[in-house]
Amino acid sequence: MADMQQVTVIGRDAKFKGELSFDSSLKVLGLLEGLIRAGGEVTIAEGGLIKGDVEAATIIVEGTVEGDIIARNKLQLTAKARVIGDVTAASLLVAEGASFIGHCRVGAEAVAKLAGEEREIATIETKPAAAQAIKPAAPKGTMPALNIPPMPTLQTIGAGAVLGSGVGNGMPPAPGSGWLSA
Amino acid sequence: MRYTPPQVSVPTRLTACYHCGRSFAAPIKAINATCPSCCKRLVLSDIVVKGQHQSRRVETCGIVFVEKKSQLAASDIFGGEAVEVLGELRGNVRTAGHVVIGRKARWSGDCEAPTLVVEPGAVIDGGFFRINAGPPVEAEATDATSAHGSSEQ
């Protein structure tokens, strides 16, 4: 029994909502709403419905998938399959009668490109955290020097000040006009 | 006495016009025809692409076949019976039959067909596919018809 291939089965009457992630295989007979990530094979049996994205090594669709599919190895659409969503697969097999609406990218390049894009996104996400870690910590008791640009000096206008003619029009005040002379 | 030609029954096949979509019977050996409904000229023979071919439209009631190591680039490709690609194809494909993408083929463009066969090893560069998706939306059909009409004039 232990040698048998481990397969997770979502039964015909079952309804699952959420994210599934595992290394073995999955067979969906019921309704699954959410994201699936599997290392092995995912089979959507006849009558099975997935509303969400599916990512696995091998995906066999006999039922319905409403979401994007990423098959790192092989994607097989049988005669009764119905897929509405984008498909990325290293290899695609479509049986006569299968229904598919969406963008399609097939080939080892497509999967490699997708993996590259994911890696790029991951590095962008981790960059700020890494930069913080490298920054030397300020010694205890001292405030870290802040790199704030110098503020323009402000002059208060005293009581009885007479505004010059050049104020407000971008022109320098005329000499002896009383600009800032309190 | 008036001469009456002998009645010869010519074997025919059912063909659909790629301009108006109406079906009509055409002789099996015919390579061209005029649609009895819209009076536009139709190509009935198969189109085989050897080497490199570029054009705006490739349309036939028969089969469009792209041979190995050959390239076909066209904005609109219509094969009434089928579109089979063993080489490289770039363009938007419509067919009333099946689409076959061979194991060394490279496909770039949209596809609308009742049946799709993708052999392992084929490369598809992300086109929009409508396979066995039922009849297209009415608006799209009218747009396509008007586009055909304007190009002919």
Image (cartoon, rainbow, N blue to C red):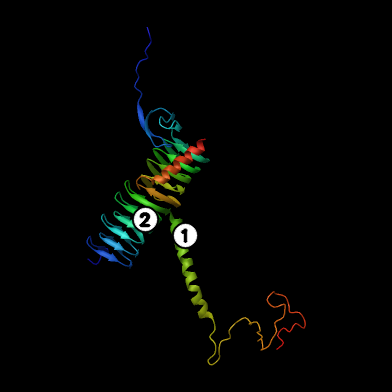
The quarter of the picture where the N terminus of chain B appears is: top left
Which label was assigned to residue A113?
Answer: 1
Can marks 1 and 2 be said to lie on one chain?
Answer: yes
Q: Secondary structure at mark 1?
A: helix
Name the spot of residue B115 as percent of width and height, x first: 36, 45
Q: Residues within 10 Å of mark 2 (few under 14, many from 20)?
A: many
- Residue that label 2 marks: A74
Q: Is residue A176 above or below residue B66?
A: below
The chain carrying label 1 is A
Q: Nearer the viewer, residue B153 or B93?
A: B153
Figure label count: 2
Name the spot of residue B135 as percent of width and height, x first: 36, 44
Q: Is residue B7 above or below residue B58?
A: above
The amino acid at mark 2 is: Lys
Name the spot of residue A157 as percent of width and height, x first: 66, 86
Which label was assigned to residue A176?
Answer: none
Q: Are marks 1 and 2 in contact (CB under 8 Å)?
A: no
Left or right, B64 with respect to A152, comes to left
Q: Nearer the viewer, residue A12 or B68?
A: A12
CA distance separating discs 1 and 2: 16 Å
* Picture residue at 49% right of the left edge, 66% below the top: A120
Q: Residues within 10 Å of mark 1 (few under 14, many from 20)?
A: few
Q: Residue furthest right?
A: A175
The amino acid at mark 1 is: Lys
Name the spot of residue A176 as percent of width and height, x first: 77, 83
Q: Nearer the viewer, residue B130 or A172?
A: A172
Residue B49 visible here: no
Q: Secondary structure at mark 2?
A: strand
Pointer 1 or 2: first along the chain: 2
The chain carrying label 2 is A
Which of the 4 quarters of the picture holds residue A30?
bottom left
Residue B48 visible here: yes
